[in-house]
């Protein structure tokens, strides 16, 4: 069924158009919305686009990086300053999906998709959102919790602090198909260390709940510990706490719960999958 | 609903068509331009059968909004040959039995072209990565990977 396509150049106008029309959906890279249209989603009556160059810009010169919502996964892979995000970006889709899929769109990808959002959650990212009432910044964790009810808001950019060193940020995606497939689960861990001991870790899971979540019990169990067999054991024992994975075509919920601790242990010990 | 006029370059030629609001690039190519080389597979961006190049970059035409390609240059498998001469990739696919039912082939060719346009001597791993978004249910991929490596090797020989 044909839909109306409305293109705006100013975020506020696009946000106003979105919030005034219940059938309007925002089109980023197209990998979610065009797919829905192909599947005959009649709830979509209008597509809203934002043609604003600021959306495709990356600011990564300082300690804090800001990535425009329209930046594609392919763009991330071309940007050396964003090397810490290359692992999750490379593991998403094939080259064509990465040419299209955007950072902003990934925050809306339903489980088991959305691996980049998992990485950004572990990095304590902030989301800059434009609503009908103006722009504001919110924590990604808070954003993910309300995203399905946040009709009428547009993600403008995502910001996070650069990890202090490559070892301080780790990502792992578990898939059944090589070289890549949809996530059985994914894990991202930000592991700042003080004197060899983990301080304020953030561990995030993908496909372990309807949205990307933090493994808060494992984070608490890892605080002040060293990244060796005895140091990580308590975190691994708590790995499954707070998760509510789904059974889908990729994996059963039972399997996801069984293996999340195994993969968390390997990630924390720096071992191969 | 009124149709939207759309102009772009298709395999080097300017084309002008009218598309429905929300129409995909794939439907514009197949239904309006009459190029049936890109295939409709899953409609979800999961199989790669509809892969085409926009300004040299591989995309999935089934989930690309047609209106977004206004003024851009689209390359499809239909434009690979030069007169009766097959493109080296097409010739290599024939020689290495890289097509069986052939449904994935146009997408595979364009994914491979995107790789070879950038990297004329790819490793096997790079070839596997380049076609990792394209599904083939017949060949088991090995003949396709071998064909792409052979086409790359031949192109390198010719330049040497």
Image (spheres, rainbow, N blue to C red):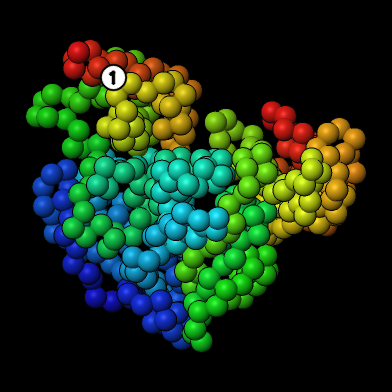
Where is residue A223 drawn, in percent x and y?
84, 50
Q: Is residue A147 above or below residue A78?
A: below
Locate residue A205, reporting x and y percent: 71, 51
Instruction: State left or right for residue A106 relative to residue A173.
Output: left
Residue at image position (34%, 32%) is B115
In the depicted view, which residue is nearer to us: A67 or B78? A67
Identify the residue shown where x is 72% and y is 33%: A270
> At 54% across and 31% down in the image, what residue appears?
A179
* Dot 1: element: helix
Q: Label 1 neighbourhood size at 10 Å, few (<14), some (14-19), many (20+)?
A: many
> Where the N terminus of chain A falls, by quadrant?
bottom left
> Picture quarter containing residue A242?
bottom right
Question: Camera-side residue: B102 or A273?
Answer: A273
Residue drawn at point x = 85 percent, y = 54 percent: A220
Judge whether residue B8 can be spotted in this image: yes
Mark 1 = which residue? B151
Give the chain of mark 1. B
Residue B123 occupies quadrant = top left
Residue A232: image location, x then y, percent = 85, 40
**Residue B21 versus residue A266: which sits nearer the camera?**
A266
The answer to whether residue A111 is visible is no
- In this picture, is A214 found above or below A229? below
């Amino acid at each position: 069924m044909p839909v109306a396509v409305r293109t705006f150049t100013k975020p506020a106008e696009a946000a106003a158009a979105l919030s005034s029309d219940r059938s309007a959906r925002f089109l980023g890279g197209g990998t979610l919305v065009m797919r829905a249209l192909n599947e005959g989603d009649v709830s979509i009556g209008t597509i809203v686009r934002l043609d604003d160059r600021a959306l495709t810009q990356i600011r990564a010169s300082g300690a804090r990086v800001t990535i425009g919502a329209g930046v594609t996964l392919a763009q991330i892979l071309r940007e050396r300053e964003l090397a810490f995000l290359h692992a999750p970006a490379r593991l998403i889709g094939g080259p064509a999906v990465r040419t299209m899929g955007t950072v902003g769109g990934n925050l809306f990808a339903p489980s088991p998709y959305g691996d980049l959002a998992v990485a950004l959650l572990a990095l304590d990212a902030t989301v800059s959102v434009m609503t009908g009432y103006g722009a504001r910044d919110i924590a990604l964790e808070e954003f993910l919790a309300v995203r399905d009810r946040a009709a009428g808001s547009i993600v403008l950019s995502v910001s996070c602090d650069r990890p202090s060193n490559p070892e301080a940020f780790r990502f792992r995606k578990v898939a059944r198909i090589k070289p890549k497939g949809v996530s059985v689960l994914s894990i991202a861990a930000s592991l700042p260390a003080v004197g060899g001991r983990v301080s304020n870790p953030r561990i995030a899971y993908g496909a372990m709940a309807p949205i990307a979540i933090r493994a808060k019990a494992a984070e608490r169990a890892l605080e002040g510990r060293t990244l060796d067999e005895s140091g990580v054991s308590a975190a691994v024992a708590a790995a499954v706490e707070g998760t509510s994975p789904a059974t889908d075509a990729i994996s059963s919920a039972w399997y996801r719960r069984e293996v999340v601790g195994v993969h968390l242990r390997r990630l924390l010990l720096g071992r191969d999958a | 609903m009124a149709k939207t006029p759309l102009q772009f370059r298709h395999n080097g030629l300017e084309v002008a068509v009218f598309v429905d609001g929300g129409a995909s690039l794939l439907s514009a190519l197949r239904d309006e331009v009459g190029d049936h080389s890109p295939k409709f597979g899953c409609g979800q961006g999961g199989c790669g059968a509809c892969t085409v190049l926009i300004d040299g970059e591989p995309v999935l035409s089934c989930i690309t909004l047609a209106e977004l390609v206004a003024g851009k240059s689209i390359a499809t498998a239909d434009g690979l040959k030069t007169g009766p001469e097959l493109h080296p990739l097409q010739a290599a696919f024939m020689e290495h039995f890289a097509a069986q039912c052939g449904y994935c082939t146009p997408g595979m060719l364009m994914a491979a072209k995107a790789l070879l346009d950038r990297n004329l001597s790819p490793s096997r791993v790079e070839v596997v990565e380049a076609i990792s978004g394209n599904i083939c249910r017949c060949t088991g991929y090995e003949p396709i990977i071998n064909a792409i490596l052979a086409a790359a090797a031949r192109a390198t020989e010719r330049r040497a």
